[in-house]
Image (tube, helix red, strand yellow):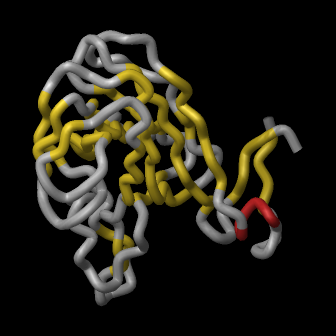
Amino acid sequence: MTTKSQIYDHPQYITRQYHSFGINAAGASTVFTKWTAPTAAYVYSVTACNITASTSTQTSWNGVGASNVVQINADQFNVIHVWNGTAVATSTHGPFGISTGTATVTQTAGAVANIPLSGSYINSSGTLTGTTGNVQSGTNTTSLGAVYVNQGDTIHILRGTDTTAVSGFIMEWAPQPSANVTGPY
């Protein structure tokens, strides 16, 4: 693998990228493959699809509306961010529900939830801050609408405690403009 700097308008920078975590086998707290950031990047959202309905009731945010929703037969997940720094640290974002609607709802297989992640913002001094903040609020007017990750950081999906649910996950991300990219170039 090599690391190099690309031109700002290279397609790698102006097109959002996607990573599929795949589909899990049924079982509680399933961990998926990890994604390792090839460069400094922004993670914008995670889209989750419930393939086999769960048998549990969850109360969590599902990306719609401003508050938690009671979700019957809906799966739940967390996004785990492992920092690649001098000391290993983690941030847990979630739990998020895989359901639709803003009120109590009973889900069936096929429910899709798009969870926007917005915890990073640039403060009045021009410094990137809030990378471990509440990604559910996104109320800061200077929000980048994403969670910032360093080159080498990893993102993991951890499913909820339901033992029957089967779900699939896709993450939307983009390199930070002018960041070095590592890959087989």
**Which residue is painted at 25% across and 79% down in the image?**
140
**Which residue is painted at 37% across and 41% down in the image?**
81
Work out whether residue 141 or residue 126 is closer to the camera in this orientation and state it. 141
Q: Dividing the picture into quarters, in which one does residue 71 lie?
A: top left
**Which residue is painted at 42% across and 74% down in the image?**
144
Above or below residue 13? Residue 142 is below
Q: Position of residue 147 (x, y in %)?
A: 40, 58
Q: Dividing the picture into quarters, in which one does residue 66 lie?
A: bottom left
Whether residue 81 can be seen here: yes
Q: Residue furthest bottom?
A: 124
**Image quadrant where one finds the N terminus:** top right
Q: Dividing the picture into quarters, in which one does residue 16 lie?
A: bottom right
Q: Position of residue 87 (x, y in %)?
A: 34, 37
Q: Position of residue 165 (x, y in %)?
A: 33, 20
Work out whether residue 172 or residue 39 is closer to the camera in this orientation and state it. 172
**Image quadrant where one finds the C terminus:** top right
Whether residue 86 can be seen here: no
**Which residue is painted at 12% across and 30% down in the image?**
57
Q: Is residue 173 left or right of residue 81?
A: right
Q: Is residue 61 left or right of residue 156?
A: left
Q: Position of residue 127 (x, y in %)?
A: 37, 77
Above or below residue 145? Residue 90 is above
> How many numbered circles are shown?
0
